[in-house]
C-alpha cells in the first residue's frame, strides 16, 4: 500500500492549531476583560464540564538531575520565577507577566505568556500551592492549555551536590481528542522542553 496514506503530519498540525487556537481565544477574552459576566460564566461552566466529565487520561513526566552545587544555591535559582526564561526554549517566547514576585510562597499566583505553536500567544496562570523550604514546591495551573497541570519540584542533598526531581502530572481537554493530541505532539513537546532545560541547567552549573 502507498506509504503516504500513513503520513500523519497534516493531522498532527491540525490538532496543534485547533488546540492552540481554542485556548488563545479564551485567553484573549480573559486578558482584554471585555467578556460579559454571563458569557464568562458559560465559558467557566463548559470548562468545568470538560474537566469533570470529558477528559483525557492523566499523563506524567519525570526527570531526575544531579546538580554539583549547594542546596542554598539550587533552591535560590529554581524557586525564582525570574529564572524560568533562562531554562525555557527561545522558540516558545516565554514571558512572565506578573511583577514584583519576590520570595516564593504558598498561594502565589504567577501569570505567563508563551507561544507553543505557530508563534500564537497563549496565556497561562499557575499557583504555587505548596512550599517546604529546601525540600520541595508545587505549582498548579489555574488557567491555561491543560485540564490539569500539577508540577512537583523536589530537592535532596546527595554526595557532591543536590539531586533535583521534577514530576509532572497533566491531562488535556476534549476526551479522546486530548489523548490523540498528546500522542501526536503534546508529549513530544513537553519532553523537548524538559530535555532543553536539562542541558541548559548543565551549562549553567
Image: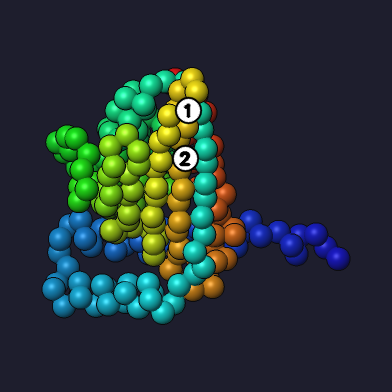
Toward which corner of the image does residue 76 lie, by quadrant?
A: top left
Q: Which residue is drawn at 35% across and 38% down?
A: 135
Quadrant in which the N terminus is drawn? bottom right
Q: Earlier in the sequence, mark 1 or mark 2?
A: 1
Residue 176 in the image, given as x and y percentages of width and height: 54, 73
Q: Circle 2 sits on which residue?
A: 165
Q: Residue at x 20, y 75 (%)?
A: 41
Residue 68 in the image, given as x and y percentages of width and height: 47, 20
Quadrant in which the C terminus is drawn? top left
Residue toward you, 156 or 141:
156
Q: In the rendered view, would you say 74 is above or below 140?
A: above
Residue 11 in the image, given as x and y percentages of width and height: 60, 62
Q: In the rendered view, would you say 40 is above or below 66?
A: below
Residue toward you, 64 or 156:
156
Residue 158 in the image, given as x and y percentages of width and height: 48, 27
Q: Circle 1 sits on which residue?
A: 158
- Please indicate, yes or no, whether residue 65 appears anywhere in the rendered image: yes
Q: In the rendered view, would you say 125 is above or below 44?
A: above
* Mark 2 nearby-residue class (10 Å; few <14, some 14–19, many ≥20): some
Amino acid at each position: 500500500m502507498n506509504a503516504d496514506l500513513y503520513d500523519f503530519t497534516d493531522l498532527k498540525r491540525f490538532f496543534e492549531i485547533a488546540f492552540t487556537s481554542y485556548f488563545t481565544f479564551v485567553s484573549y477574552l480573559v486578558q482584554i476583560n471585555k467578556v460579559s459576566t454571563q458569557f464568562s460564566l458559560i465559558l467557566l461552566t463548559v470548562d468545568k464540564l470538560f474537566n469533570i466529565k470529558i477528559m483525557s487520561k492523566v499523563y506524567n513526566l519525570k526527570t531526575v538531575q544531579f546538580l554539583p552545587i549547594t542546596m542554598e544555591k539550587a533552591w535560590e535559582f529554581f524557586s525564582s520565577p525570574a529564572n524560568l526564561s533562562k531554562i525555557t526554549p527561545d522558540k516558545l517566547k516565554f514571558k512572565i507577566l506578573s511583577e514584583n514576585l519576590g520570595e516564593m510562597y504558598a498561594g502565589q499566583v504567577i501569570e505567563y505568556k508563551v507561544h507553543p505553536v505557530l508563534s500564537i500567544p497563549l496565556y497561562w496562570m499557575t499557583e504555587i500551592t505548596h512550599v517546604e523550604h529546601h525540600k520541595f514546591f508545587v505549582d498548579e495551573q489555574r488557567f491555561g492549555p491543560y485540564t490539569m497541570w500539577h508540577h512537583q519540584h523536589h530537592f535532596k542533598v546527595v554526595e557532591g551536590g543536590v539531586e533535583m526531581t521534577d514530576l509532572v502530572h497533566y491531562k488535556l481537554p476534549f476526551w479522546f481528542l486530548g489523548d490523540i493530541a498528546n500522542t501526536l505532539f503534546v508529549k513530544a513537546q513537553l519532553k523537548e522542553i524538559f530535555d532543553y532545560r536539562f542541558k541548559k541547567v548543565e551549562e549553567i552549573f
